[in-house]
């Protein structure tokens, strides 16, 4: 990885470049954009609390603090995932190339990161077993089930199923090797009220993303950077989650599986 340059909001090595910037809007609304460049896909990983059961500081099995998971994995930047263990129907979970759960038909939209670094979202109502077989044939590296998808062919959908403002977390895709994590603080009067899905989609569109996808929000939505909180959770102890998305120095060549 060579020489590493770090500041309070950036990390740069031979393999990874990350800048995390806060944005403040009238509302008030505060959100954070982690702009991510990686040379090797193995720098983009997920972690499950289940894998660290013997180190779990929480009181419940199979879930863990995003902060603790980020520290255990030596994540540079991490964001809460889709929290799939809270749901038992209509979802697919593929993490770092390993299938953890699969039950169809899908209840929610899915987001797929392929081994070639491309990312696609698929609407639940349009995705049947034949399409899922095609997705698997293209070798998915990660599959998340939550949503909704925030962009359709680069444009914001005409409407979403709710217009309520909440804390939100999501992922955006520009091109292979270039991604972003976005975290919106919310439900905090005088500081940040949160966003609805249309506002959230506008953030990704304005950033220039081709694909954008919403992950678990509310009490779950948090971001860490270099092992400390980067966002400001609405509760002193945010809801524990089953999984995180994170960026690290490459572990091996993901392209070689």
Image (cartoon, grey):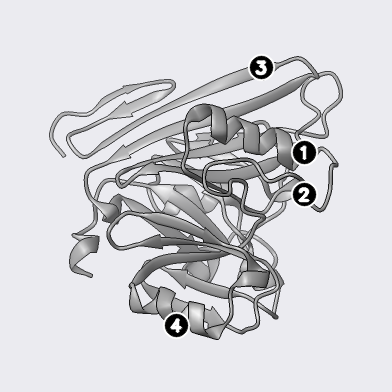
Between marks 2 and 3 in the image, the one whose residue lies nearer the viewer: 2
- Is 199 or 222 nearer to us in this picture? 199
- For marks 2 and 1, give the CA distance: 9 Å
User: SS at mark 1?
Assistant: loop
Mark 1 or mark 3: name the one nearer the start of the chain. Answer: 3
Task: Name the disc covering residue 160, or none.
Answer: 2
Task: Name the disc covering residue 24, or none.
Answer: 3
- Tell whether label 1 touches label 2 (CB within 8 Å): yes
User: SS at mark 2?
Assistant: loop
User: SS at mark 3?
Assistant: strand
- Tell whether label 3 touches label 4 (CB within 8 Å): no
Task: Name the disc covering residue 133, or none.
Answer: 4
Check the image and report above or below for 210 versus 116.
above
User: SS at mark 4?
Assistant: helix
- Is 224 or 91 nearer to us in this picture? 91
Residue 100 appearing in the image: no
- For marks 1 and 4, give the CA distance: 33 Å
- For marks 4 and 2, give the CA distance: 27 Å
Mark 4 or mark 2: name the one nearer the start of the chain. Answer: 4
Q: Residues within 10 Å of mark 1 (few under 14, many from 20)?
A: some
Between marks 1 and 4 in the image, the one whose residue lies nearer the viewer: 4
- For marks 4 and 3, give the CA distance: 42 Å
Task: Name which residue lies at 76% across and 14% down.
Answer: 26
């Amino acid at each position: 990885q060579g020489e590493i340059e770090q500041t309070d909001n950036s990390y740069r090595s031979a393999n990874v470049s990350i800048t995390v910037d806060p944005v403040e809007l009238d509302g008030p609304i505060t959100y954070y954009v982690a702009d991510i460049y990686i040379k090797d896909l193995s720098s983009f990983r997920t972690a499950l609390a289940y894998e660290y059961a013997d180190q779990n500081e929480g009181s419940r099995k199979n879930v863990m603090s995003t902060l603790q998971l980020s520290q255990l994995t030596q994540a540079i930047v991490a964001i809460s995932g889709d929290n799939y263990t809270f749901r038992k129907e209509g979802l697919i979970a593929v993490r770092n190339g390993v299938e953890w759960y699969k039950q169809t038909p899908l209840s929610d939209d899915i987001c797929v990161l392929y081994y070639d670094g491309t990312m696609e979202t698929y609407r639940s109502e349009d995705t049947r077993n034949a399409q899922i077989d095609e997705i698997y044939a293209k070798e998915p590296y990660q599959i998340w089930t939550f949503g909704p998808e925030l962009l359709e062919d680069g444009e914001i959908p005409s409407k979403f199923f709710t217009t309520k403002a909440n804390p939100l977390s999501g992922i955006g895709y520009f091109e292979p090797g270039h991604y972003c994590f976005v975290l919106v603080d919310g439900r905090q009067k005088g500081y940040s009220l949160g966003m609805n899905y249309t506002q959230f989609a506008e953030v990704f569109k304005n950033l220039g993303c081709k694909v954008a996808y919403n992950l678990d929000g509310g009490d779950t939505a948090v971001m860490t950077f270099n092992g400390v909180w980067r966002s400001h959770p609405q509760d002193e102890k945010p809801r524990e989650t089953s999984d995180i998305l994170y960026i690290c120095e490459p572990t091996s060549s993901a392209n070689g599986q």
